[in-house]
Image (spheres, coloured by chain):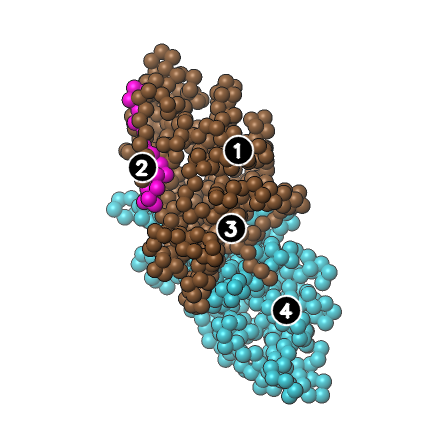
Chain colours: A brown, B cyan
Amino acid sequence: MIWDNTTLFSDDNPADAAFRKEVREWVDKNCPENLRDRPSRVTPPEMKPWHRKLYERGWIAPHWPKEAGGMGATLEQQLILFEEISRIGAPTPFPHGLNFFGPILIHAGTPEQKAKHCPGILSGEVTWCQGYSEAGAGSDLASLKTRAVLAGDHFIVNGHKLWTTNGHYADWMFALVRTDAEAKPRHAGISLILIDLKSPGVTVKPIKTIRGDAEFAEEFFDDVRVPRENLIGPLNGGWKLATMLLGGERFATGHPRNAAILLNRARQVARVTGADADPAFRQQLAALEIDLLAFTAYYRHGAALHGLGKVPDSMTPVMKLAAGPLAQAASEFLVQVAGPAGASLADMDIHGEAVNPAEDLFEMRRVTVGGGANEIQRGILAKRTLDLPS
Amino acid sequence: MEPILDEQQSLMRETAVRLCKDHGGPKRARALRNAATEMDVPAWMELVRSGWLSAAVSEDAGGMGKGMLDVCLALEESGRQLLMVPFAEVAAVAHILGKIGARAENQLRAIQQGLQILVPALPQEGWGNVGSALPLARSEGGQWFLDGTIKHVPFAQTAQSYFVAAKRSSRKKAGGEIMLCAVLKHLVKLHTVQNVDGSTSSELVMEGSLVEESQVMARGGEAQALLDTLRDLLAITTGAALVGVSSQALDMTLDYIKYRQQFGKALGSFQALQHRVADCFVDIELNRSLVYRVAASYDAGQGHPAMAAAVKARTSRVALSVTRDALQLHGAIGYTDEHDIGLYYKRAIALAALYGNDINQTARFSALTV
């Protein structure tokens, strides 16, 4: 029996299996070669043609309802699309518009707001970024200070946003801003507004990451005028919208495929470096594969419960606490297996395929920090699930 | 997360929760240990009455046709309440016998009715990786005679017979084929020692132990395949019990740190402790899903031996680390014999060591997934 760590516990019904086959063939035929298995980051301009292809095929927003221009797909179909796109090492489209903002817009936007913004998100014409974090508001997001003061039919925005992925490529930002400085608790004074980044008073500066590329940026807002109609949901009602978990979004970020790909890469590298002859290598690989199997079981279990509407609150933090460290351990293992080449800026040539262990290592550092650091997730579990006192 | 069950399975689980609570628990486990009692007979009779042994046997073979998922649900509860019964063993053997058909019919009926306890006696060292020499079987006048020693057999004193894999000694070729047979207890010598948790470990010595032809269950390729499956099932069932042990140890620890005050507040309010128990919770949650999924895969005929190895490796690893953390968070009281948390630590040690520990099973997983 062949062990394939990318298809563990997948239980497609016949219709899903047919869909998987269709997606697999189409992705293989249509994904641009230069985007596959890339060690370096894909930028938004590079992503656009691929985004467009998926859009034209009708597969760009599987989780959006049909009336909003999505597929209205089941979670199983959403997972199949994700799995088949990543199977050949193709990138999944950026999530900020499609997965983060889109569901909020569909849920809370006015008909006019939806008509204005949904088409650009779907077609990929408009690049979005998420303006949540600030210098003084990371894990403690509710302490954010960027102010939006209502003056007639406009908000006047002043402040600073930080760690904004793709901020220097983005056309628009959906931002959490403080609209009531006196509110208690603090998150009751926060609103969600849309900022056109081409507005006067906006300054965007890219930030070089530990990986060496500019993944994110910071934005300075200096008396930026934002029309009142760019408010999403009620005034001072932004926190609830931003922290709401909509649909199957939580399944997209923690997919076990990320770790599986890294472990398979480690196997390939080990064959070239000769590390695979070492019993210590094999034992460590097996221990990681076992963790991957356990996490995959949890993931599939969660997906099945999602279909039944029975997902417990603990699933999101558990998934994050399991997926992140596992992917990181896999990337660290890959670096070990590469030996001296693990420290190199240059790509390794593994049977004609470029592999850069250090790039993977750095890339994986973000997963336990972004979207609520793992320490925050542990606190959430301790208080909400394990019922421990403050 | 809760398993996804049909109505019958939910009922089975409710029954298991009640049965294990009523008949098990730390107090009972302690009494059995102190009295050096190998098996809890009343608890065993109760679970036989509740039809647990039929759960592992297919309808075709006269059972209730459920499967390993049901068995694992019951074992999770059994582990939680420290039941001292050979259910993981007998259920795995019953499942195997159910696949054999007519030759095993009588044995299987006796097991399901609670008239016979048949436990596997398989070499434990390295759990199939290294040094697992099987006893030898020689044929004389239509009968078989077994020679060899098998170490670390659990529940050997209570069992009426043992499910043994032996190698036929052959003059023609080296090695020879494998056979599976039932060996009666009074035909072997036992040397029994107690384990840390009060369970027992017996060395089973066979010197020309007689096996009638009717007690030979399978031979050759069939025997090897059944032996492999039996090993997988033992890993899975014991893994399920380990999830129960881990989960209960964590629950007891949570209760303790909510109640115990130091520095004027509950221990559970300290972040260092909160993060530690959160990590324990994550580890256990993943294992619970792993056991459910792997058991269901076996029930669907899609099991893979590497899955079974993964279950035993990870449930052993996590049970040891969770019960160790549980002890630590209990402070000095956790170091006493009087406190129940130590019973969970010791049960974790005993079950982790059986049927391949973390290291054995991880190596096995590696060999199976090359």
Task: List the residue tagged with mark 2.
Answer: A207
Dot 1 falls on which chain?
Answer: A
Q: What amino acid is labelled 3 in the image? A: Thr
| Residue B334 visible | no
Task: Using the image, tell me which numbered label, if any, was put on residue B287.
Answer: none
Q: Earlier in the sequence, mark 1 or mark 2?
A: 1
Check chain identity for marks 1 and 2: say if they share one. Answer: yes
Query: Three-letter amino acid code at disc 1?
Result: Arg
- Position of residue A34 relative to residue B46, above or below, is above
Q: Is residue A196 visible?
A: yes
Q: Nearer the viewer, mark 2 or mark 3?
A: 2
Label 3 or label 1, whichever comes before in sequence order:
1
Asked if residue A354 lies left or right of residue B297, the reply is left
Which residue lies at the image location 63% right of the left edge and 81% below the top edge? B176
Real-space Cα separation, disc 3 to disc 1, in angstroms: 31 Å
Q: Which residue is mark 3?
A: A296
Q: Nearer the viewer, residue B25 or A39?
A: A39
Which secondary structure lies at badge 3?
helix
Q: CA distance from mark 1 to mark 2?
A: 27 Å
Residues at marks 4 and 2, CA–CA distance in whole angstroms: 59 Å
Query: What distance separates the C-alpha of mark 1 from that of mark 4?
Result: 52 Å
Q: Are marks 3 and 1 on the same chain?
A: yes
Element class at badge 4 = helix
Q: What label does residue A52 carry, if any?
A: 1
Nearer to us of marks 4 and 2 is 2
Q: Residues within 10 Å of mark 4 (few under 14, many from 20)?
A: few
| A116 over B105 or under it: above or below | above
Crowd tier of the residue under label 3, counting other residues whose Cα lies within 10 Å: few below 14, some 14–19, many 20 or above: many
* Residue extent of the magenta highlight: A209-224
- Please state which amino acid type lies under the numbered disc 4: Ala
